[in-house]
Structure formats: structure tokens, C-alpha cells
Image (tube, helix red, strand yellow):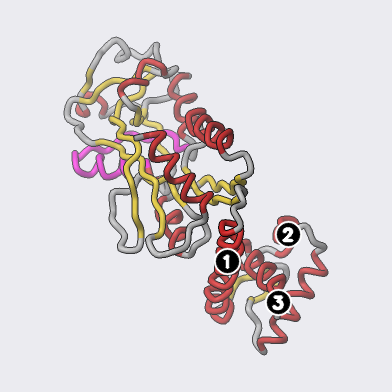
């Protein structure tokens, strides 16, 4: 067994699709299949259940994947540690974020000007639970999360506190109002995020705590899509924003009288693990940039 086999197995296990895995690894599918078969022969068990073209990680595979993830992460951390010891300015930072908006791009750009040899692997995810899982399995260095739940293995620093506004189009009959109440919105068409999105989990909590059931006509996976649909007059939505940027939006953001909740953006990382100089510089830069 060698590291190349481990990397191939890890990718196939993550995607559970041989063709997509071959494409991501940039190898021929027959060569990838042969490598996985050789690994299974060495272990004496099959790691996947195969039915036709379907390939699904089985119980043996799940156990082995945990070990492989740890081995590959240790190797990567060892490589990075040696690079740090040699004084290299290069590095690799992996993180996950829900939004990849202009502000997000601005701070990545400004960080990259200071550390031009640092490379990134960015995963866009709306679900904070998945982000926490990726942190705990060492698949990413950092995650930008909104969850208020505390995890014993995870550290987090608040970066941004946003008020929750009601977003309406400039032509909406409520647009001239500075403030509204939830009771006025009973029959209004709402645009929600998808159920697995961290912002929607937060909104569902608000709905439940206030005994409010919105009339949902549409669900989106991107906050930018909500802005566009609200601006077009399709519906209204809850929308987090810092007060200073409230007037800069293409939609009208109204205060909600009976809503005192805040949306808190945090940067999170696993407590007990090695961080490269590049990762530490990135974390420090992000915290200083926002705080």
C-alpha cells in the first residue's frame, strides 16, 4: 500500500462515483478502478458495495477511511511543518464558507497581496453541521459559521454581528415604513433559504419562538438569489445585514419591532491540531480584518 492508493481511495470514498473521482484526480477511470481493486486485494476485503455502476462505501470502507484521512492529514501537516521550519513563505489553507460575496473576495484579495505564495482550497457550504464535521475530520483548517451551538473540540471567534431585517423590494407597499411587526406579515409571500442552510435554521428558530408561520413560495440556496428575487418583487424575506451597510443594498431593509435576534458570523477551527504558518497568518488576518 502507498499514499497514492490512499489518496485515490479517499477521493472515491468522498464522491462515491468512479467517473467523477477519476476526473477530479485527472487519471483514467480504468487506472483508478485498478488501483482501488489492488488496495482491496491487499486488505483482503472489499471497501465498496457495487451494484451496476453504483459504488457505495461499506462498513469496512468507513472504518478504513477514518484511518486514511488521519494518515493523509498527518503527511500534509508534516510536509507543511518542514516547510515552515525551512522558512518558506508558501502554504496552503483550506476553509469553508456559506457566502462568497464581494466583501469575502475583498479580504481574500488583500490577504493574498501580503502572502502571494499562499494557496487556497475553498468549499462553499450552507450547512454549519457539515462544516463542523469537516473541521473535526481535519479536511479543512477553518470554517465561517453562524451556529450558536458550542462544540467541545471547536474554537470560534465572532467576526461580525448582523441585525435581522425584513427585505422588501423598493416598490413594495411596506418599503416606506421604517419598521414593521411580524403580525403584519401573515399573508405575505416569503422567500426562504433551503432547509439545510445555516441562515434558514436560524430563521426557523425565529419562526418557532415567535409562533409565526410564513407563507413560503420559494426556497433558495444562495443569499444573492434572495436579494435578486426580493428586488424583483417576487416575495419578502428575512435578511441579515450590518446597520452601516443597510442603505447600500439593492433592496429595502426594514426593522422588525418584535425581533431582537442577531446573526453572528464566526471563524471556527479544531482545537487540538497542527496549523501551518500560512493558516495561523490567515486566521490572525481574518480576525483583525473584521474585528
How many neighbours does mark 2 have within 10 angstroms: few (below 14), some (14-19), or many (20 or more)?
some
Task: Using residue 97 as the reference point, say whether residue 12 is left or right of it.
Answer: right
Give whichever of 184, 5 is nearer the camera. Answer: 5
Q: Which residues are magenta?
A: 199-220
How many neighbours does mark 1 have within 10 angstroms: few (below 14), some (14-19), or many (20 or more)?
some
Name the residue carrying label 2: 25
Q: Residue 2, labelled with which disc?
A: 3
Q: Are marks 2 and 1 in contact (CB under 8 Å)?
A: no
Name the residue carrying label 1: 78
Q: Residue at x 62, y 51 (%)?
A: 88
Give me the C-alpha separation between circle 3 and circle 2. 16 Å
The quadrant where residue 180 appears: top left
Residue 217 x/y as whole percent: 41, 33
Q: Is residue 203 magenta?
A: yes
Q: Are marks 1 and 3 in contact (CB under 8 Å)?
A: no
Please say if 273 is above or below 33: above
Q: Are marks 3 and 2 in contact (CB under 8 Å)?
A: no
Mark nearer the N terminus (2 vs 1): 2
Callout in the foreground (2, 1): 1
Amino acid at each position: 500500500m502507498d499514499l497514492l492508493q490512499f489518496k485515490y481511495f479517499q477521493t472515491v470514498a468522498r464522491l462515491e462515483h468512479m467517473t467523477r473521482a477519476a476526473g477530479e484526480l485527472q487519471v483514467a477511470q480504468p487506472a483508478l478502478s485498478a488501483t482501488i481493486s489492488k488496495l482491496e486485494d491487499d486488505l483482503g476485503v472489499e471497501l465498496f458495495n457495487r451494484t451496476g455502476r453504483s459504488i457505495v462505501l461499506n462498513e469496512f470502507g468507513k472504518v478504513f477511511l477514518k484511518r486514511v484521512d488521519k494518515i493523509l492529514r498527518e503527511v500534509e501537516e508534516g510536509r507543511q511543518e518542514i516547510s515552515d521550519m525551512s522558512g518558506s513563505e508558501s502554504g496552503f489553507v483550506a476553509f469553508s464558507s456559506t457566502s462568497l460575496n464581494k466583501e469575502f473576495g475583498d479580504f481574500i484579495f488583500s490577504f493574498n497581496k501580503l502572502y502571494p505564495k499562499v494557496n487556497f482550497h475553498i468549499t462553499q457550504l450552507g450547512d454549519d453541521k457539515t462544516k463542523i464535521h469537516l473541521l473535526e475530520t481535519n479536511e479543512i483548517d477553518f470554517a465561517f459559521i453562524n451556529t450558536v451551538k458550542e462544540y467541545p473540540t471547536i474554537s470560534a471567534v465572532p467576526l461580525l454581528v448582523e441585525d435581522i431585517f425584513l427585505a422588501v423590494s423598493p416598490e413594495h407597499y411596506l418599503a416606506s415604513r421604517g419598521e414593521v411587526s411580524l403580525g403584519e406579515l401573515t399573508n405575505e409571500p416569503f422567500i426562504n433559504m433551503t432547509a439545510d442552510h445555516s441562515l434558514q435554521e436560524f430563521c426557523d428558530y425565529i419562526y418557532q419562538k415567535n409562533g409565526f408561520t410564513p407563507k413560503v413560495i420559494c426556497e433558495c440556496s444562495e443569499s444573492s438569489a434572495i436579494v435578486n428575487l426580493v428586488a424583483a418583487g417576487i416575495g419578502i424575506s428575512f435578511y441579515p445585514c450590518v446597520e452601516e451597510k443597510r442603505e447600500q443594498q439593492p433592496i429595502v431593509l426594514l426593522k422588525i419591532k418584535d425581533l431582537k435576534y442577531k446573526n453572528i458570523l464566526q471563524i471556527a477551527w479544531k482545537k487540538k491540531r497542527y496549523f501551518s504558518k500560512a493558516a495561523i497568518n490567515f486566521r490572525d488576518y481574518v480576525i483583525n480584518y473584521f474585528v
